[in-house]
Image (spheres, rainbow, N blue to C red):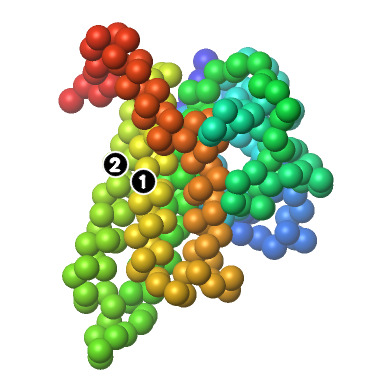
Amino acid sequence: MTGTMDDSERELLTEALRKTMTAPTDERGSLDGALADLGWSDMLAEAPADAIRTVFRLLGETGAHAPVLNDVLLHEAGRPPGGTVPMPYAGGLWVCWERDAAGAEPVGIDPELPLRVLPEPGAPVPLALGRQALGWWLVGTGHAMLTLARQHVLDRHQFGRPLASFQALRHKLAETLVALEGAEATLLAADGDLSSLLAKAASGRAALTAARHCQQTLGGTGFTAEHALHRHVKRTLALDGLLGSARELTREAGQLIAARGAAPRLVHL
């Protein structure tokens, strides 16, 4: 039996989580432990949809990371939280998201994520909730990049005018927002394997669109180590590959629909 949170509960939870995720490491210690202290396991058991949406979107918005994707996959498999589970990665790889970051080998372009490549495939586990979780994480990361780009065009001037007045940049940021809001709609509608697969694919594409357009908007500034954008771009590229990339999942969805001979109705309007 699972429940949902009302707006006031979700707002309080969001405030507490944001404060925890943005606190200096020496003040909060391990984010994994801090989330456990806030009752992450209980939230996941009692209101999984709200817990996943709130926690993973905030991980994206704040640029933080924690190995709690393991808990989502374990929860869907009917197993207790706190351990790790093999996860499929783009290109036929399998990885483990370590609980202890010490000694973990980075996968892909984001060295902050403690992912370890496994020598052989792991046992299959249900992936629907995990793909929803990653979708919310990617959407949050996309919004973080959009916020940085928006502030840049408001603050910077060229030819005596703010960058925000140039139509080409306005169109890029508008396209980014539309892509992210479309991905959110697919995540809110996801309630099964195929819809979760499509939601993860849409979220990956939206975050990659955000990375491309926001990088173009920021120009050379976005490439510098001092600016936060490059960390979000790396995070997007790494998360897109986890549990299937947008390209792979789109191809898989097409094969499933072709095999059925019809496209199921995912949202009733």
Residue found at x 33% / y 28%: 189
State the residue position of label 2: 182
Report the side of 55 relative to 197 (left or right). Answer: right
Residue sitting nearer the eye, 43 or 188? 188
Work out whether 139 lies above or below 81.
Answer: below
Quadrant of the image occupied by residue 99: top right
The x, y position of residue 211, in whole percent, is: 41, 56
Q: Amino acid at mark 1?
A: Ala
Residue sitting nearer the eye, 59 or 105? 105
Residue 178 shows in the view: yes
Residue 244, numbered label: none
Quadrant of the image occupied by residue 89: top right
Q: Amino acid at mark 2?
A: Gly
State the residue position of label 1: 206
Which residue lies most toward the bottom here? 160
Which residue lies most toward the right here? 103
The x, y position of residue 35, in whole percent, is: 67, 43
**Are discs 1 and 2 less than 8 Å apart at CB?**
yes
Which of the two discs, 1 and 2, labels the residue nearer the N terminus? 2
Residue 56 shows in the view: no
Q: Quadrant of the C terminus?
A: top left
Mark 1–mark 2 Cα distance, whole angstroms, equals: 8 Å
